[in-house]
């Protein structure tokens, strides 16, 4: 539709055809030439944008358009000079930048030379030079933008596939490290117990007991590994919060990762999990209950009397009472308070003049030579 709008400029050649200034045969030939020009133009623009054509087809189509523009403009009246504008636009859309620039300049130069033959043509050239140049170079930029967008999508898909493959490999390595030795030991002891069973049942019983012990340890290792996989991470929850708020139509101001001022010790697993759960619960409450239009998430390392902490603040402009107050804790906030209490963290929530704010603090492991470096 956007490209079709600009076909309105072909009204000048159409008006010339129906003006009666030419013989019927000339009008018919002019109409056929215009129809062929528009067909090649639209085919080149649409097809080449969706799927790149081979170079020969592109050059043949542009040569046809240029020749037809020159022929119709030279044999008919000056309104046909507008065809050079479409030739310039097609060159910018279909040719790579190094080849598009000279092709656009050639089309504009041919239009100028053809238009200077007549006094009326000079007026048309004056009004068409800038559109021809701007249209050609603008379409060249659009073409580059489309190609960059396609490459970016392909790169994102490749990165996602590589990340998934890497995660599978990591899972395979972890399972091998966790279960490989244990299962081999269980198999070996089972065979040994089978050989001892008829003659030495006491020794066989010892092997069976060892099998039970190894099996229980393997089960514990697997459970710990699965718990680690399921443990929420703060960067992951930040990305999820950004997506959730955007889907809900809420303007989101969310950091892309952890702040740079963290101490060397960083966040412990339990503290990070507590902050991640807090962020998830806060964003869920914003989406479900606040009717907010904007939500701001901040992560700030601070030094307190109890030691370094990482402060998470989630503030929205939704339903809230005037002034500040204390929120009535529901099950979600109560559970977060208990979870934070286990790691020495704190939670504060309340209404503000502009909405509602949740502030969570979790302790950081101090750096070897001081709280922050």
Image (cartoon, rainbow, N blue to C red):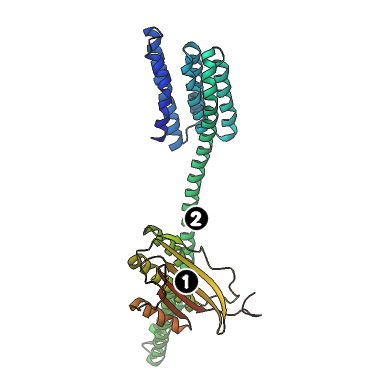
Q: Position of residue 175 (x, y in %)?
A: 45, 71
Q: Nearer the viewer, residue 183 or 148?
A: 148
Tell me the quadrant of the picture where the C terminus can be found: bottom right
Which residue is at a point 42% across and 18% down the rendered structure image?
A: 13
Q: Nearer the viewer, residue 66 or 85?
A: 85
Q: Nearer the viewer, residue 177 or 358?
A: 358
Quadrant of the image occupied by residue 243: bottom left
Which residue is at a point 50% across and 29% down the rendered structure image?
A: 89
CA neighbours of label 1 inside 10 A, class few (<14), some (14 to 19), many (20+): many
What residue does disc 2 label?
A: 159
What residue does disc 1 label?
A: 313
Relative to 283, residue 6 above or below: above
Relative to 365, residue 318 above or below: above
Q: Position of residue 369 (x, y in %)?
A: 66, 80
Tell me, yes or no, if residue 184 can be seen here.
yes
> Do the residues under discs 2 and 1 have CB atoms within 8 angstroms?
no
């Amino acid at each position: 539709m956007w490209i079709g709008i600009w076909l309105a400029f072909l009204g000048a050649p159409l008006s010339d055809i129906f003006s009666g200034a030419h013989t019927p045969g000339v009008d018919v030939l002019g109409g056929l030439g215009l129809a062929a020009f528009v067909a090649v133009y639209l085919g080149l623009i649409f097809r080449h944008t969706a799927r790149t054509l081979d170079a020969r087809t592109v050059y043949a189509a542009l040569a046809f358009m240029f020749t037809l523009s020159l022929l119709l403009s030279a044999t008919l009246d000056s309104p046909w000079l507008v065809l050079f504008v479409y030739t310039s636009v097609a060159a910018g859309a279909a040719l790579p930048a190094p080849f598009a620039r000279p092709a656009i300049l050639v089309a504009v130069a041919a239009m100028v030379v053809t238009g200077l033959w007549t006094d009326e043509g000079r007026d048309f050239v004056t009004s068409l030079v800038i559109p021809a140049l701007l249209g050609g170079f603008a379409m060249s930029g659009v073409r580059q933008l489309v190609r960059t967008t396609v490459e970016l999508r392909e790169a994102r898909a490749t990165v996602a596939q590589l990340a998934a493959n890497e995660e599978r490999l990591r899972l395979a390595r972890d399972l091998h490290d966790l279960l490989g030795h244990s299962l081999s030991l269980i198999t070996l002891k089972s065979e040994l117990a089978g050989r001892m069973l008829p003659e030495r049942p006491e020794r066989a019983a010892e092997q069976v007991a060892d099998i039970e012990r190894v099996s229980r340890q393997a089960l514990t290792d697997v459970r710990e590994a699965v718990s680690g996989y399921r443990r929420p991470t703060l960067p992951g929850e930040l990305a999820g919060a950004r997506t959730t708020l955007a889907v809900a139509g809420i303007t989101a101001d969310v950091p892309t990762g952890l702040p740079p001022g963290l101490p060397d010790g960083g966040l412990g697993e339990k503290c990070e999990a507590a902050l991640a759960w807090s962020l998830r619960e806060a964003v869920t409450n914003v989406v479900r209950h606040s009717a907010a239009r904007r939500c701001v998430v901040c992560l700030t390392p601070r030094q307190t009397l109890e030691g370094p902490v990482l402060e998470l603040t989630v503030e929205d402009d939704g339903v809230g009472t005037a002034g500040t107050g204390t929120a009535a804790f529901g099950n979600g906030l109560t559970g977060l308070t208990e979870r934070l209490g286990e790691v020495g963290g704190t939670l504060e929530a309340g209404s503000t003049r502009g909405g509602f704010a949740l502030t969570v603090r979790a302790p950081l492991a101090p750096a070897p030579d001081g709280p922050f470096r």
